[in-house]
Image: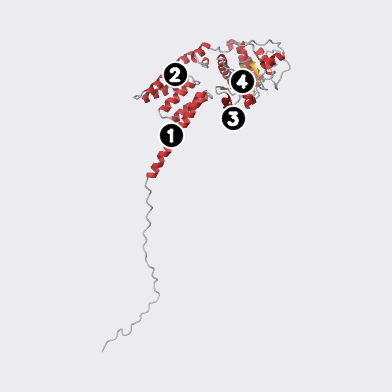
Amino acid sequence: MELPQLPPKDAKRSDLVASHRGPTKRSNWMVPGRLMAGDRSSLDSEESLRAIFSSGVTTVVCLQTRQETSAAVDYRKKAKALNPRVAFVEQPIPDQEVTDDAMVEELVSQLLERLAGGEVLYVHCRGGHGRTGTICAILLGRMYKLSAAEAMARTQVYHDVRQQPVFAAEGYEETKDGSSCVILFPSQRQQVVRLLRGEAAVPALDRASSAAYGPGASKYPVEKMVEWQGKAKEAAEALNSGKQKTEGKEEELQKAVDLFWQAAKLRPDFARGYLGLARALRLLKQPADAKHAVLHGLEHCTDDGALLQELQKIDKELEKQTIVEEEQEAPAAAAEPAAAPAAAPAMTWKPKVAKPSLVMLMGLPGCGKHLA
């Protein structure tokens, strides 16, 4: 990865403003043309987003927690509209704190690979100071093989060329504990020191592994990547075979489903694997399972464009399926004969005769007389 030369430690502020000031009021370049640090608010307006993308940014790295992002306006839809090819990376870190060293190592490894692949990063938290400064200081140290003291001192210097730095330092001398880097909290400085202590303390990246198996492969053992590649290849072959076959089609597609799941377990960030899995399930007439596979993939491959498009197709398919089922149920309901109304109970009319309380016997004229 070719990098621009670092400015001299005694560089004039005017020169640093010219080379490291960012396109928005609260952003700055850590490595001009490659790595930018900034705040969240710079992503909320279309004008600022345009300025950031115009500077060459291709990937936005968010360090905010889910609680923070859920309470804020989601900038991703607007960003996609302005730059359909923009990528998003997320690693939640608590405000004013640090997260686990291993998780930071994994994030830094991924970002270094993206940088090596030509991507231009915009790293942000809420204000673009502590969490952003922590990750950027580690990246700067790894990229230029700097000590923690120098990496943090330079991080503060570059931060302060912003139009609105907010937390500016009074001096930029290198100190062993990084105390001159006032944008970082003590725990954040300590993490930078730990992770930049020396090559022996940091797992070396296997660049050959990334070249052979794609971005992100360096965080997996080579043996696992060999197994993953074999499963993925076999799964793809089974899917293609299932598409072409008439006899034994379902068997091939089910084989593809099983193999894609195995490949995804070996490498959870295998976006194309979830895509192949979903397509195999759709061909098996299992759109609900296909949707589950895509959603599972998006948990590991946040905002992957191909997976999001596949999700839209599946949702439309499920909607059509629901409509068809409802139409099939309607005629069946209409064809059923209406139940005959229950017969009314038989009614017998009986005249009600009052019981006499007094009987009078009256004789007719001539009754009881004999004729002479």
Q: What element carries label 3?
A: helix
Say whether residue 333 is visible: yes
Q: Mark 2 points at which residue?
A: 232
Q: Which amino acid does label 2 sit on?
A: Ala
Q: Quadrant of the N terminus?
A: top right
Quarter where residue 181 is shown? top right
Circle number at residue 182 = none
**Spatial separation of the CA atoms under disc 3 and disc 4:** 27 Å
Question: Is 268 placed above or below 73 here?
Answer: above
Quadrant location, the C terminus: bottom left
The residue to which callout 1 is attached is 321
Residue 191 image point, x, y percent: 62, 17
Residue on which the image places disc 3: 70
What is the secondary structure assignment of the residue under circle 4? helix
Q: Which class describes the residues within 10 Å of circle 4: few (<14), some (14-19), or many (20+)?
A: few
Mark 4 or 1, nearer chain start = 4
Give the Cα distance between marks 1 and 3: 32 Å
| Residue corresponding to mark 4 | 54
Q: Circle 1 sits in a helix, a strand or a loop, which is it?
A: helix
Q: In which quarter of the image is residue 371?
A: bottom left
Q: Which is closer to the viewer, label 3 or label 4?
A: 4
Upstream in the sequence, badge 3 or badge 2? 3
**Where residue 338 appears, x then y in whole percent?**
38, 48
Q: Is residue 178 visible?
A: no
Dot 1 alpha-carbon crowd within 10 angstroms: few under 14, some 14 to 19, many 20 or more? few
Q: What residue type is labelled 1?
A: Gln
Looking at the picture, how far across and down is residue 353, in whole percent? 38, 70
Helix, strand or loop at mark 2:
helix
| Amino acid type assigned to the residue bearing label 4 in the image | Ser
Residue sitting at 64 percent across and 17 percent down? Answer: 29
Q: Which of marks 1 and 3 is nearer the N terminus?
A: 3
